[in-house]
Image (cartoon, rainbow, N blue to C red):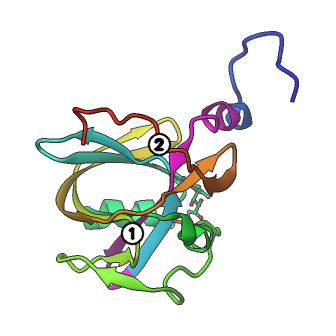
Amino acid sequence: MAVPAIFARPDGMAMRRTMGRFLTGVAVVTTQHEGEQFGMTINSLTSISLEPPILMISLNFNTRTGDALLASGSFAISILGVKQEAVARQFAVRGGARFEAGAFDTTEGGLPVIAGALAQAECRVAHQYDIGDHQVFFGEVVSSRFRDGEPLAFNSGKFGAFRDFNHDPMPWMF
Ligand SMILES: Cc1cc2nc3c(=O)[nH]c(=O)nc-3n(C[C@H](O)[C@H](O)[C@H](O)COP(=O)(O)O)c2cc1C
């Protein structure tokens, strides 16, 4: 695509394409309300605070998962590995069945999470804001676990793998 000559206020698609250049991992957010399970694929997952442990997700207003999450006050996230692209697609089909197929674990609080995910975390909603066309949820992490593995990546609308992690580590971080 040719580089546009001017800066311009982005419409929805231009905003998606602008921010789509920011490489992310892929996660599934899940929740449960009145006995029904809900879940959807997201890449708006961000770590916010370490102590206390808080993360953030941003969900479009018109998702079934967002409404259920607002009503239940709790949710879980599963950070997907590179072999879980099919799960990411299954949880992104609008109106599609989510829990009929696949393998799930259960958090201590009884929420479904994706089995084999690189990390799973259960959260209690600490704050919720409506901003623009999204609902932003800040979740206090009440329990989590993680394993090593290659992450599923997403960039410019495509799933993929980001394999070159052999540069020098940031020594103070991990
Ligand atoms: C890689 C990827 C990332 C996504 N990230 C988000 C996100 O952060 N927030 C959001 O609202 N939708 C996101 N979506 C779209 C939802 O997964 C999709 O709209 C889903 O069908 C909503 O499900 P629901 O309406 O059944 O809850 C993403 C989709 C993909 C494939």
Identify the image quadrant of residue 91: bottom right
Q: Which residue is under mark 2?
A: 166
In front of the other: 142 or 73: 142
Q: Residue 99: x percent and y percent? A: 49, 84
Tag 2 or tag 1, which sits nearer the N-term? 1
Q: Would you place residue 58 above or below residue 115 in this image?
A: above
Q: Which mark is residue 160?
A: none
Return the residue found at the far top: 6
Q: Residue at x 18, y 76 (%)?
A: 109
Q: Quadrant of ligand 1?
A: bottom right
Q: Residues within 10 Å of mark 2 (few under 14, many from 20)?
A: few
Q: Residue 22: say if magenta.
A: yes
Q: Residue 53: x percent and y percent? A: 17, 47
Q: Would you place residue 43 above or below residue 39 in this image?
A: above
Q: Residue 66: x percent and y percent? A: 43, 60
Q: Identify the element where label 1 is drawn.
A: strand
Return the residue found at the far left: 51
Side (left or right) of 174 relative to 136 = left
Which amino acid is tagged 2? Answer: Asn
Closer to us: mark 1 or mark 2? 2
Q: Which mark is residue 30?
A: 1
Q: Residue 35: say if magenta.
A: yes
Q: Identify the element where label 2 is drawn.
A: loop
Which amino acid is tagged 1? Answer: Thr
The magenta region covers 15-36
Task: Give the alpha-carbon distance from disc 1 to disc 2, as whole Å.
Answer: 32 Å
Q: Residue at x 42, y 63 (%)?
A: 149
Whether residue 9 appears in this view of the structure is yes
In front of the other: 58 or 84: 84
Q: Residues within 10 Å of mark 1 (few under 14, many from 20)?
A: many
